[in-house]
Structure formats: C-alpha cells, structure tokens
Amino acid sequence: MTRSPAHVDRLSLEDVNALSTDAFTHYFAGVLEHSPQYAEAAAAQRPFKHVEEIADAFRTAVQDDSKAAQLKLIRAHPDLAGKAALAGELTAESAHEQASAGLDRLSPDEFAEFGRLNEAYHEKFDLPYVVCVRENDKDSIFEGARRRLANTPEQERAAALHEISRIARLRILDLIADGNGK
C-alpha cells in the first residue's frame, strides 16, 4: 500500500535524481492511481532541475500513452464519495484528498447527489468523474460535475486527463522536500 502524504519522508530533488529506477518507481507509485508504469516512464527523464519537471514527466508519459491506456488510468480513479470510500478501499492519497474537500462528511442529501452524478457519469461516459478535489470545495465539485456532464466523450476524456495531471502535480509536491507540498 502507498503511504499517506503526511506519513512519508520527503526526499530532496537531488535525492530523487539519485534513486534507482526501481526505487523511483516505488517512491512515486501513488502519484497516479494504480498506475506505477508512469513513474517508471518519468524516471527515464532524469535528471530533473526543478520539481515541476517531475510533474511534466508524468504528464508527458500519460499523453504519450495509447488512448486505451489513458482510459484505463481514468477508470482507475474512484468515484467521489462512492462505494470504495464507504468501504475504506481508497488509496491513502485519494482518502486524504477526498477528506480535504469534506467529501467524507457529506449530508445524506449531498451523498445522494454524488451517487446520482457518479451514476450519470458512468452511464454517459463509462468513466468516473475525476477532479482535483484539493483545488476545489464540495460546491465547486458538484457544479463542475453538472457542467461537465454536457461534454462530449472526447471532451470529458481530455478534461479528466487534465484533472489527473493536476492531482499528480500536487502529489509530487507532497513528496519532494524542496517542492511546495505541505
């Protein structure tokens, strides 16, 4: 299991550049949901001069992958306030992020609304609604989901990948001592 951002010893950029490919892949395995292959691809882009280059390496690895692999990555993300959250089956990173936006403290009506939105997303796009919850609050998350339901499947795939890159960037910042993570 990956470690919660609050429970990881953060490495310096110099230390990250010195890691073996296996150690780099293991350290950054939680950056993209259940997709450590992108950490391995990012490792090949070293040395990094700045933490933002690490985020760019992950984004490029995803962009350069096949459409099928991108869809698999999107589908690896849990529904917001969904069954996995209720069952305690989220990755440490996702659980921390959903809690930061208050998604672990929803009213019954809000929980039901998330259920309806999640169902609508799966029905229309065969994808979960993916958003960088750390950059939103529950009201903006609801509004964004309603708005994005008007997207075409291709627009939604692009929107989800954009949000995934934002999530990855924040997770990377959490792991680097000289990054801006908290």
Image (spheres, grey):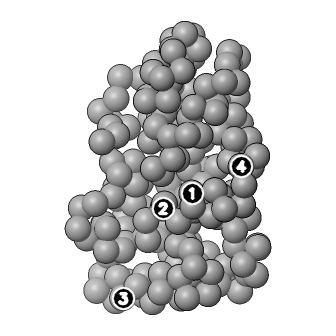
Q: Is residue 180 above or below residue 37?
A: above
Mark number, residue 65: 4
| Residue ID for mark 1 | 73
Give the CA distance from mark 2 to mark 3. 20 Å
Q: Sequence-wise, which precedes: disc 4 or disc 1?
A: 4
Mark 4 and mark 2 lie on one chain; the one further toward the N terminus is 4
Disc 4 is placed on an element classified as: loop
Q: From the image, which quarter does the N terminus lie in?
A: top left
Give the structural element (helix, strand or loop) at label 3: helix
For residue 73, which quarter of the picture?
bottom right
Residue 14 position within the rendered picture, expressed as x and y whole percent measured from the top left:
57, 10
Helix, strand or loop under label 1: helix
81 vs 166, left or right, is left
Q: Residue at x 46, y 37 (%)?
A: 29
Dot 4 crowding, Cα within 10 Å, few <14, some 14–19, many 20+: few
The picture places residue 25, in percent across and down from the top left corner, at: 49, 29
Which is closer to the viewer, label 2 or label 3?
A: 2
Tag 1–tag 2 contact (CB < 8 Å): yes
Within-10-Å neighbours for mark 2: few <14, some 14–19, many 20+? many
Q: How many angstroms separate mark 1 from mark 2 (CA)?
A: 7 Å
Residue 151: x, y in percent?
73, 81
- In three-dimensional space, the C-alpha distance between marks 3 and 4, rounded to whole angstroms, equals 35 Å
